Image (tube, grey):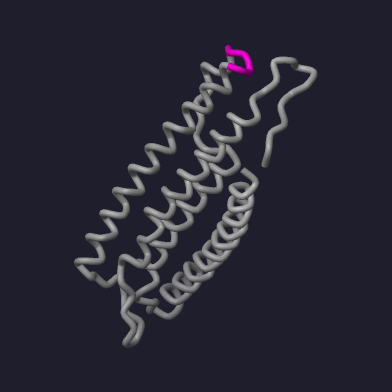
């Protein structure tokens, strides 16, 4: 379990760094596009498709970060009326179900990525350098695999560290 937590921390650092870098790039490139269009009647041809794909990357990385921090979309109407042990069981089942769904979506993402690689479509060109569309769509299966890993890790944490029934001694929540 400690190895999984170490991997989780390393991934967390990488994901946070990527999100900050990509968001900064998006803001600067968008601002440059606005200035170029409004004041110089020109623009960067590849900027718009590049920005659209950066949004995809930030969305998937953000979803993985939200899963890591257990801040993903959560409907907890039932768990409000249950004690800590039944709530823990529901969380474990929910996390494992979400992990299976993420696995299936990651597998579908790999199929999609394979189709994109076969078509060899180009997203944009800068000079003589061609940027294939599939490079920017790698985040689809990667993002779902990251979320699957995080859901499995959260389920394991809830299994190995169940909440205490005694309110004076609450369970420790890792993170």
**Which quarter of the figure has residue 48?**
bottom left
Question: Magenta segment, principal secondary structure?
Answer: helix
- Residue at 49 percent across and 65 percent down: it is 26
Residue 137 position (above or below residue 8): below
Q: Residue 33 in the image: x percent, y percent?
A: 44, 72
- Residue at 65 percent across and 30 percent down: it is 161
Q: Residue 88 in the image: x percent, y percent?
A: 58, 23
Q: Which residues are magenta?
A: 81-85
Classify residue 166 as left or right of residue 116. Answer: right
Q: Nearer the viewer, residue 48 or 152?
A: 152
- Outermost residue, left side: 119
Q: Residue 147 in the image: x percent, y percent?
A: 47, 45
Picture quarter with the C terminus: top right
Q: Nearer the viewer, residue 55 or 130?
A: 130
Q: For residue 84: magenta?
A: yes
How many numbered marks have been drawn onto this rendered protein structure? 0
């Amino acid at each position: 379990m400690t190895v999984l937590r170490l991997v989780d921390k390393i991934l967390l650092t990488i994901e946070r760094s990527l999100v900050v870098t990509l968001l900064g790039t998006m803001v600067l490139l968008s601002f440059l596009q606005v200035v170029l269009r409004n004041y110089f009647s020109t623009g960067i041809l590849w900027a718009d498709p590049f920005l659209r794909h950066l949004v995809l990357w930030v969305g998937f990385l953000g979803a993985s970060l939200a899963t890591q921090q257990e801040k993903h979309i959560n409907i907890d109407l039932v768990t409000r009326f249950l004690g800590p042990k039944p709530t823990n069981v529901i969380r474990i089942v929910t996390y494992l179900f979400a992990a299976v769904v993420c696995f299936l979506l990651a597998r579908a993402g790999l199929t999609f990525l394979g189709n994109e690689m076969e078509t060899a479509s180009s997203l944009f060109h800068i000079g003589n350098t061609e940027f294939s569309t599939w490079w920017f769509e790698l985040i689809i299966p990667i993002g779902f695999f990251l979320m699957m890993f995080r859901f499995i890790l959260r389920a394991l944490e809830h299994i190995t560290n169940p909440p205490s029934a005694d309110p004076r001694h609450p369970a420790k929540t890792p993170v």
